[in-house]
Amino acid sequence: MLEQRIRNVALRSRVCTADEVQSWIQNGMTIAVSGFTKSGDAKATLQALARRKDKTGEPIKINLLSGASLGETDGILASRGLLGMRLPFQSDPDLRKSINLGEISYIDQHLSETAEWIRSGWLGDIDFAIIEATAITENGGIIPTTSVGNSPIFVEKAKRVIVEINLSLPLELEGVHDIYLPTARPNRQPIPLVNVRDRIGTTYIPCPPDKIAAVILTTAQDTPSNVSAPDAETAAMAGHILEFLSHEVNRGRLPKNIGPLQSGIGSVANAVLSGLVQGPFHDLEIYTEVMQDAAFELLDAGKVRFASSCSFTLSQAMRRHVLSRLGEYREKVVLRPQEISNHPEIVRRLGVIAINGALEVDLYGNVNSTHVSGTHMMNGVGGSGDFARNAALSIFVTKSTAKDGRISSVIPFVTHVDHPEHDVDVIVTERGIADLRGLAPRQRARAIIDHIAHPDYQDALRDYVRHAESHSGNTPHALDEAFGWHLRLQQQGDMRTMPSPVRAVN
Amino acid sequence: MLEQRIRNVALRSRVCTADEVQSWIQNGMTIAVSGFTKSGDAKATLQALARRKDKTGEPIKINLLSGASLGETDGILASRGLLGMRLPFQSDPDLRKSINLGEISYIDQHLSETAEWIRSGWLGDIDFAIIEATAITENGGIIPTTSVGNSPIFVEKAKRVIVEINLSLPLELEGVHDIYLPTARPNRQPIPLVNVRDRIGTTYIPCPPDKIAAVILTTAQDTPSNVSAPDAETAAMAGHILEFLSHEVNRGRLPKNIGPLQSGIGSVANAVLSGLVQGPFHDLEIYTEVMQDAAFELLDAGKVRFASSCSFTLSQAMRRHVLSRLGEYREKVVLRPQEISNHPEIVRRLGVIAINGALEVDLYGNVNSTHVSGTHMMNGVGGSGDFARNAALSIFVTKSTAKDGRISSVIPFVTHVDHPEHDVDVIVTERGIADLRGLAPRQRARAIIDHIAHPDYQDALRDYVRHAESHSGNTPHALDEAFGWHLRLQQQGDMRTMPSPVRAVN
Ligand SMILES: CC(C)(COP(=O)(O)OP(=O)(O)OC[C@H]1O[C@@H](n2cnc3c(N)ncnc32)[C@H](O)[C@@H]1OP(=O)(O)O)[C@@H](O)C(=O)NCCC(=O)NCCS
Ligand SMILES: CC(C)(COP(=O)(O)OP(=O)(O)OC[C@H]1O[C@@H](n2cnc3c(N)ncnc32)[C@H](O)[C@@H]1OP(=O)(O)O)[C@@H](O)C(=O)NCCC(=O)NCCS
């Protein structure tokens, strides 16, 4: 068994326990770990570090880099005050809380960019890369597990590498990955990927065996994804998107199979993708950074012929299903580094159709995906910017209201901009679709109010526009009222204008 | 003479006057013209159309597409109400006025994207492409003049093409251009450009001779660029950038020749580039969308070894100088379509150092390049987003105040976001430099206030931060005060808090 998992003989003598290895981690170190949206993250060493902190109470903080969010480890570290700096993405309630209290320096980043930052030396030295692996090859090559993330650049740049071999994962994962990194500049060559299914690299992360300081054996399980099931509203959104895409195909503005699909994280994006199972499209392709359950539903339904991704982020049931059928999926699925899955060069070349979630959108099509009320970080921008900016068609999805209707997701002025109007072609809510292509700002405002805003808020939005347009401007605004809706929410817990108590008495 | 200018014999019989040709233009048509930041724009036909409008007063409006801003033609058309829709960039006072009154539908767009929109059919049919040319080759190929812009895609997709041969321009322009367009999707291939100096296309825009409906002979002159001269403040900014870049080179984080430089339009970006003439760098390369005077100053000073651009946008004196020495410059300069000069694939591959102008920046590094007070369009986003998002290093420059100090360019919350914090690495004012790389939002606010804000506004910015941080959040804000500075400007003509008259009396 171990021979298959650690094929390089010399490395078998470097098997250690996580408790031994965590002791190498010192205050102020920069640690880079595998893991992308809770999938394939190195869990053993960091959780052992948390146990040490519980025991010794010593004041130790690390800078933690990853592919994207880790599973429960993010919360375990945050709640113990172990994180000084964290990048580039997270989605854990405890970590989020510390970030929003200003206790952790959180750097939100386009997910294709972290590798470039590391290559440029902007993040300083990486003391350890800790990588979850299926196996190590004869020559030290590290075969990742259910995500690739930033592991290849971490392994290349870290001073030392720790490999956590997860024995609970099938060896059939070998062959799923395609590891390619752009060469350093200058004289970087084009990335030779021209089809979703192209394999351009190796099935393992190259690593000189001497760089591997320790190998840990583990069976720790990924934290399962907990996206909520599709509901009537997400079904309606999926319906609008299907109708829109069919229309575009009929007009000859999209290829018959639409073009490679990207779908963001979150319940809404997953539900919308899931809606394609019922749709008229065949031979679909997926070029995305994370495959949630819906992507495998589409594969199983024979709708998708190939999927390229950077991670599998699945519910417990779907994960079991996928891991037990890797032999089949290996012909139809590839996992790539996030620098490639999200690369502007490739997204633009392939003509990806991007579908990402928004927290709120404004009258002119600007999108906030990250900051609740402009201040509180939800998850991070993730790869949405990599895709939305470079996609052939950039769609954003959001329910028209949140918190039982108390919040309108369509508001006069977004409190944080992750995606400027220029990057937003189409917005979809359960109410309908606003096709913003070719519309000037004033026309966009009308399309957005008429087609996607919730009826409870349409009149108030029209009022705002009327008032704003009386001031003129290409993009009319009344700055004194622009955040009025959010202030009302802060003050009365509801964005809807309510009759004031005094007037109610009269 | 005419034999050299119209080498295809059949086309010589299609020479017409602009007044004849303009009569083909009908209400509601979509017209696509050459021209990029006032350079190489087709002037004759459109100005003849304006004369017709003056004579007949008929209600005619066109949709006008271009590379970027035209010269005086933009204002001539706008002031006569001839424009229904305009994209993707402009910089004319009269056109700007009509846009801000909501009279013209103005679509602001990343300049690399217009070609993709046209290819996708999103902008409908193009009735005429009108292209200023140096000459037409034997096979109908159109040799552009001092810009390439979107002319290649316009010629490819328009129903008919009108060529305006400008006899005042030297035939030595032949050989300066390199025309390459990405192939259609699917199966688009990598763009084979790996060095700034690579030539990957033809020296002319391919065009079947039959598509050329008319050839006009003209000697109309480009509207000269009127960037203001460097001053003490821009000199200080250039100094800060030089110091910063030297430091990065010394730390081995940039190559010795920095990497290919992009510099945006505007007085400040030009002045900053001009400052490199005094700098320690040699063998510089330029990969940009517009070469202003400073780029040629650097070539003449022997500092730049090669420059790739999409247009020359020059003062009258520099234009004369450049046109008289094309034989020499042809070895060191290439003009490309804007889809290539600004292409995310290439900008990222080459590791461009981008320097773009901002109207205002906020405490967290978000940049507004387009909308004064969030409403009034200045020029447009231009290529700044193509470069800032994909650059190896994205620098924004702005003076710390505008309008004699009455406006702070560093404010709590930008009134429009063109470049989200994620796309902004470094901000420079005459006061200094804020290096935002690796900083979390709260740290960014401190760097920005301490290093680049004007002293008149530093205390007020610190007050805002203190107040905002009392509400917590990853990106602290006080939404009730976020636009307070702009409202103060609207009300009292000055962003500085002034003692209220009442209190002043006490
Ligand atoms: C924006 C994003 C958070 C939406 O997530 P989602 O799961 O699809 O959407 P939901 O409607 O379920 O909203 C998630 C939460 O935000 C809340 N919310 C949604 N809109 C809100 C708004 N305008 N104001 C306040 N809260 C809001 C919801 O109530 C819900 O809260 P809960 O968790 O307490 O129930 C998610 O898409 C995201 O993180 N995007 C950024 C990263 C990204 O796009 N990556 C793409 C490539 S991976
Ligand atoms: C942002 C931009 C307008 C700055 O232009 P610039 O010429 O370098 O800067 P200036 O400081 O001279 O400012 C230009 C005008 O804006 C005004 N201005 C600057 N900051 C301002 C602010 N915060 N509020 C109001 N007005 C402001 C100036 O007073 C000046 O007005 P004037 O023309 O009446 O004198 C310019 O860089 C631009 O259009 N950028 C977007 C396009 C782009 O970046 N393209 C890049 C690739 S081409």
Image (cartoon, coloured by chain):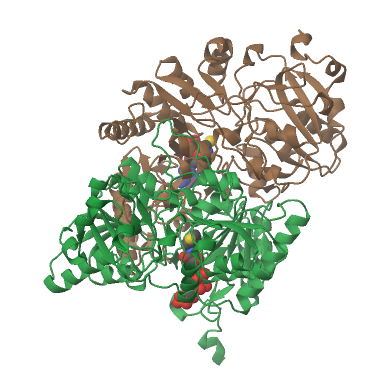
Chain colours: A green, B brown
Between B263 and A461, the one nearer to me in the picture: B263
Where's residue B32, x and y in %? 73, 36
Q: Nearest the camera: B25 or A56?
A: A56
Q: Position of residue B375 (x, y in %)?
A: 56, 53
Q: Give left or right: position of B471 versus B376.
A: left
**Snapshot quadrant of residue A217:** bottom left
| Quarter of the C terminus of chain B within the rendering | bottom left
Quadrant showing the N terminus of chain B: top right
The image position of residue B284, as x and y in percent, is: 40, 24
Residue A344 makes an appearance in the image: yes
Q: Nearer the viewer, residue B468 or B129?
A: B129
What residue is at 49 percent from the left and 44 percent from the top? A200
Residue at image x 86%, y 20%? B14
In the figure, is residue B69 to the left or right of B76?
A: left
Residue furthest out toward the bottom: A505
Relative to the observer, which residue lies in front, A480 or B346?
B346
Give the residue displayed 65% in from the left and 76% down from the top: A455
In the rendered image, residue A140, in percent from the top left (x then y), is placed at: 30, 48
